[in-house]
Amino acid sequence: MQDFNSINIGKSNKIRYIIFIVTVIITIIANELIVQRQINLQLADAKIINMAGKQRMLSQQISKAVLFLESENHLSGKNKLAALVKEWSKAHKLLSKEKVGIENTPEIKRLYIKLQPYYANLLEGTRSFISSESKSAQKEGLNKVLASEGHFLAIMDEIVSAYQQNAENKLKRTKNTVLLLSCLSVLILIGEFIFIIVPFYSRLKQQNQELNQTNRRLSDFAHITSHNLRAPVSNLNSLLHIYEISEDPEEKEDIVSKFNTVLSHLNETMNTLVDALQTQHASTKEKELVALDESLSKNLEILGAQIDESKIKITSDFSKINTVLYNKIYMDSIFLNLVSNAIKYRSKKNPAELSITSTIEKGRTVIRFRDNGLGIDLKKHGDKLFGLSKTFHRHPEARGIGLFMTRTQIESLGGTITATSEVNKGTTFQIIL
C-alpha cells in the first residue's frame, strides 16, 4: 500500500497546485489593477470638479475686478485682470474642449454649449474693458460682464453638480465592480480549492478503503489460520491417541502413514498462507481455477481421523460442474468448515451422512452440503446462524467462527450462502458462487 505522502506528489496533483497558485496570483494582480484604475479615475474626477469650481470662482473674481477698476482705473489692476482672464479662459478651454483626459457626458456637453454665449460675452467684455481707454467702451464692456455673469454662474453651478453626479456614479460602479470582482475571486478560489481538495479527499478515502481492506484481509488470514489449523491439529491428536492405544503393528504403520498425509497438508496450508502474507499487496481474493473434487479430497485427508471416528458417510457429485474460477484458499476453507461442521454436529441416533453436490442454476454455480445431523431451529436462531461467536449446540469444540467466516468469504467474492434446517433431521447449506 502507498504511504500517506504519496497522495500529494503525483503529477496531476502538482499540476493542480500550480494552477491554483497561478490563479491566486492572477486574481490578486487583476484586483490590484482594477482598484488602482478606479482610484486614478476618482482622482481625475476630483481634479476636474476642482477645475470647474475654480472656473466659477475666477468668473466671480473677474466681475469684481472689473467693477473695482471701473472706479479705480490703473494699469497694475488691468494687468492683474488680464492674468485672471487668461487663466479663466485656459481652464474653460480644457473643460469644454475635453483636453488632458477629460471626457464629458452628453449632459455636460449640452451645458457647455448653453454656457458658450455667456462665456463669449464675459470674455469680450473684460478684454474690451482692459484694452480700451475710452470711458464709453469700458462702460459697454462692464455692461456685458454684468449682463452675462449671473447666467454664467448659474450654468457653471449646473456643470459642477453634473461633474459631482458623474463622479458619484463612477464611485458606485467602482464599488459594484470591486464587489463583483471580490465575489468572483472568492468563487475562483473556492473552485480551485475544491479542484485540489476533492481529488485529495477522494485519494485519501481510497487509501483508507485500501487500509481497511488490508486489515480485513489480515483478519481473514488470522481466522483462517486459527480455524483451519485447528482441524488438522485435532486430527493429529486423534491419530496419536489411536497410535498409543493400538497394539497391532500394521495398524500403527497405517496410522504413521496417515500422520505423514496430515502433516503434508498442514505444511501445504501453512506455506500457502505464509506466501500470501509475504506477497506485496497480496489479496486473499485473487481467483484461479479450482477443482471442487480436489478441495474435497484434500480436506477429507485432513479430517481423516474425525471421519473414521464419526463413521460419517460422505458422498459427492461434481459431474455437472467441477472446475470454478475462485479463490483457492477460500474454497479450501469453505469445504473444511462445512465438512467439519457436519462431523461435529452429527446425530447419534442414526448413521451420519453428508452429501455434497454442484450444479449450474441461472448461469451461476451452486454447491450444496446436505447432512442428516442435529439440525438447527431456524425460527429461534435463524437470524444468528452466521453470526460471529454464535453457537447452537453444546459441543466442546464449538467456537462460533466457522459459519461466520464462511459467509464472510463467500459474500466478499459476490456470492451468497443460505441454510435450511430441521431439528434432528439435518441441515442443507446452499452456496451460490
Image (cartoon, rainbow, N blue to C red):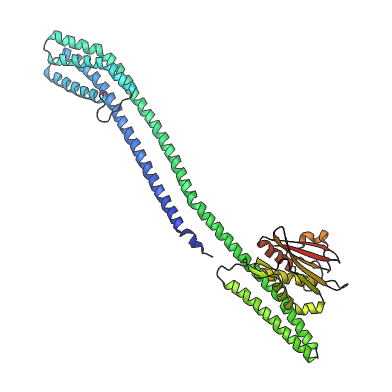
Q: Residue furthest top?
A: 136
Tell me what residue is drawn at x 59 percent, y 72 percent: 277
Q: Is residue 67 above or below residue 290?
A: above
Quarter of the image containing the N terminus? bottom right
Tell me what residue is drawn at x 56 percent, y 58 percent: 206
Kindly indicate the quadrant of the structure image that contains residue 359: bottom right
Q: Nearer the viewer, residue 122 or 423?
A: 423
Q: Nearer the viewer, residue 161 or 146?
A: 161
Question: What secondary structure do most residues of the magenta stretch adopt?
Answer: loop
The spot of residue 401 in percent (x, y) is 72, 68
The spot of residue 106 in percent (x, y) is 33, 22
Residue 92 highlighted magenta (yes or no): no
Q: Residue furthest right?
A: 349
Kindly indicate the quadrant of the structure image that contains residue 9: bottom left
Q: Is residue 257 above or below residue 177?
A: below
Residue 124 falls left or right of residue 312: left
Q: Nearer the viewer, residue 99 or 11?
A: 11
Tell me what residue is drawn at x 68 percent, y 79 percent: 265
Q: Is residue 176 above or below residue 192?
A: above
The spot of residue 431 in percent (x, y) is 73, 63
Look at the image and tell me whether residue 345 can be seen.
no
Look at the image and tell me whether residue 335 can be seen.
yes
Residue 99 highlighted magenta (yes or no): yes
Tell me what residue is drawn at x 43 percent, y 40 percent: 182
Q: Is residue 39 above or below residue 319?
A: above
Magenta-highlighted residues: 96-100
Residue 59 falls left or right of residue 299: left
The spot of residue 38 in percent (x, y) is 35, 35
